[in-house]
């Protein structure tokens, strides 16, 4: 199942594709100051922005880090895991999922013109994949959408979610 606006070209057609999110050069060799990291991230973000082919007005597409929290009635762990693995297969930009009997957290990168578009797509993710991935009938109880610069700034300052490692589906 493809998530896109009607008439939009399929993802992956273009000059580049998202492959991974690295921990950064300073991950093992000491930390840079938050200001240095923010400066570098601003340069990287400006380089990563490009016209969004889906937007007729020449708007720039940006990467947004999404954290989706879900909760609902208890379900067998094996079914929850299988559903999240299928979601990861259906939605290739999924970074990591954590789960328990009655709640889960899904983290991934989304490309969108602005925060409103990224949030709208994120709020539809679970419902659109519920039947095809056989996900539990849970509801979204939390949503965080932050731009790439803010994500890297939080990591550099030692706050926020750590980079998704290991990538995949894991129990809490």
Image: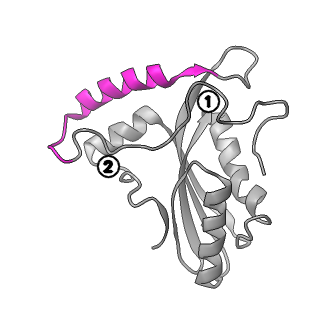
> Which residue is nearer to you in this view: 28 or 15?
15
Please give left or right for residue 134 compared with residue 172 in the image: right
* Circle 2 crowding by C-alpha within 10 Å: few under 14, some 14–19, many from 20: few
Give the structural element (helix, strand or loop) at label 1.
loop
The spot of residue 139 in percent (x, y) is 69, 65
Residue 172 higher or lower than 51, as above or below: below
Which residue corresponds to the image point at 60% horizontal and 66% vertical from the top-left? Answer: 85
The spot of residue 136 in percent (x, y) is 70, 73
Mark drawn on residue 20: none
Please give left or right for residue 75 compared with residue 5 in the image: left
Q: Mark 1 points at which residue?
A: 114
Quick check: is 30 in the magenta stretch?
A: yes
Among all residues in the image, which is located at the extreme left? 30
Residue 59 higher or lower than 159, as above or below: above
Please give left or right for residue 132 compared with residue 67 in the image: right
Mark drawn on residue 159: 2
> Which residue is nearer to you in this view: 72 or 16?
16
Q: Give the range drawn in magenta.
A: 28-51
Which residue corresponds to the image point at 84% horizontal and 30% vertical from the top-left? Answer: 7
Sequence order check: which comes first, mark 1 or mark 2? 1
The spot of residue 26 in percent (x, y) is 21, 40
* Circle 1 crowding by C-alpha within 10 Å: few under 14, some 14–19, many from 20: some
Are the residues at dot 1 and dot 2 in contact (C-beta closer than 8 Å)?
Answer: no
> Which residue is nearer to you in this view: 38 or 77?
77
């Amino acid at each position: 199942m493809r998530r896109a606006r009607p008439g939009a070209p399929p993802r992956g057609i273009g000059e580049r594709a998202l492959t991974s999110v690295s921990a950064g050069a300073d991950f093992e060799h000491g930390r840079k100051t938050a200001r240095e990291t923010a400066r570098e991230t601003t340069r990287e973000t400006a380089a990563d922005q490009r016209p969004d082919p889906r937007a007729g007005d020449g708007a720039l597409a940006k990467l947004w880090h999404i954290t989706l929290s879900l909760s609902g009635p208890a379900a067998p762990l094996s079914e929850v895991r299988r559903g999240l693995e299928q979601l990861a297969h259906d939605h290739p930009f999924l970074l990591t999922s954590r789960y328990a009997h009655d709640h889960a957290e899904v983290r991934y990168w989304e490309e969108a013109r602005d925060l409103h578009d990224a949030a709208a797509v994120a709020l539809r993710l679970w419902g659109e994949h519920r039947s095809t991935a056989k996900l539990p009938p849970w509801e979204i109880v939390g949503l965080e959408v932050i731009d790439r610069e803010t994500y890297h700034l939080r990591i550099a300052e030692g706050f926020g979610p750590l980079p998704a490692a290991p990538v995949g589906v894991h129990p809490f």
